[in-house]
Amino acid sequence: MSKVWFITGCSTGFGRELAKEVLAQGYKAAVASRNTDDVKDIITDYPETAIAVKLDVTKADEISAAVEQIKQKFGQIDVLVNNAGIGYFGAIEESEEDEIRRMFEINFFGLANVTKAVLPNMRSQKSGHIVNIASIGGLVGFPTVGFYNATKFAVDGFSESLAKETKPLGIKVTVIAPSGFRTDWAGRSANESKTVIEDYKTTAGANKENIRGYSGNQPGDPVRAAKAIVKAVESENPPLRLLLGAAALKGGRNKITELQRDFDAWEETTVWADNPKQ
């Protein structure tokens, strides 16, 4: 039986390209978006293997309804891809609480709640694969996206813990960490702070201009990213973390080097902090 994919955030970017890819490869897919009109063109050619699902990941009732709709149509969910997410630009001091909380509700709590809704189905099957779209910004912090980084660091930690909990149950977990890709993330999908503090001009301000400036011209190809995600899911031993993009690989390796340097430099103090009872 063909695997059933449930993909959130399919109106643009990774979600859209991934939905098109899995359907073209013969899988079944629940293509989710806040407005199903945005994904009708994706499912038109696949009336037997695709359904459009209305889903705002911040709404518990829509999550429950989406899972039930998929089960009614296909009977199961084999692969969940938590792709829905937004960006937000601003130095940490500049950032507005309502925007921060909205981003956390979508990027982290929405992802977590969709995952929790799907897990009972996967546990009963003794199989499944959960793919969480994070970012290289979930491993490496950057100026102007500190709170976005925080949401993606949360996704990474959540995914690592989830993988350890679900491995004995036959459920695999992969967290995807892309660098710059030609999606809408740096365009209309990302708001920015209304407050601008001059002291952050050369750090947060400069990076915001850089990110906005190359929107649409990033080296990353969403079509290739979709193929890479399918390849990971099809793998007998999929990675816990899959970096996508040369910049992601460079950033990840630099982070390992930085960690190793600090760990080694402070090893004596680190070990000294233990004082076992005799």
Image: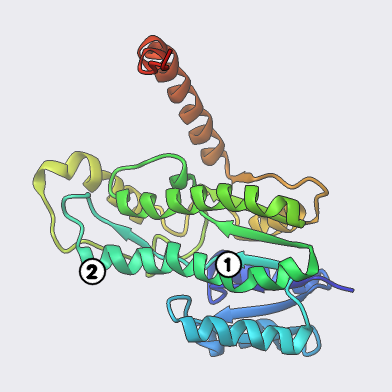
Between 158 and 103, the one lying in front of the other is: 158
Secondary structure, mark 2, is helix
Q: Residue 278 location, x and y as percent?
A: 43, 12
Is residue 31 rendered to the left or right of residue 157?
right
Q: Residue 190 location, x and y as percent?
A: 35, 64
User: Which residue is farthest front?
Assistant: 278
Write down the residue under mark 1.
115
Snapshot quadrant of residue 142: top left
* Label 2: how many Cα within 10 Å (few below 14, some 14–19, many 20+): few
Q: Is residue 45 visible?
A: no
Q: Amino acid at mark 1?
A: Thr
The residue shown at (45%, 25%) is 259
Is residue 16 rendered to the left or right of residue 27?
left
Between 261 and 253, the one lying in front of the other is: 261
Q: Residue 24 location, x and y as percent?
A: 79, 72
Secondary structure, mark 1, is helix
Q: Earlier in the sequence, mark 2 or mark 1?
A: 2
User: Which residue is farthest right?
Assistant: 1
Q: Residue 179 location, x and y as percent?
A: 50, 47
Task: Tell me the tag on residue 98.
Answer: 2
Between 38 and 75, the one lying in front of the other is: 75
Is residue 103 rendered to the left or right of residue 92?
right
Q: Amino acid at mark 2?
A: Asp
* Label 1: how many Cα within 10 Å (few below 14, some 14–19, many 20+): some
The residue shown at (67%, 71%) is 120
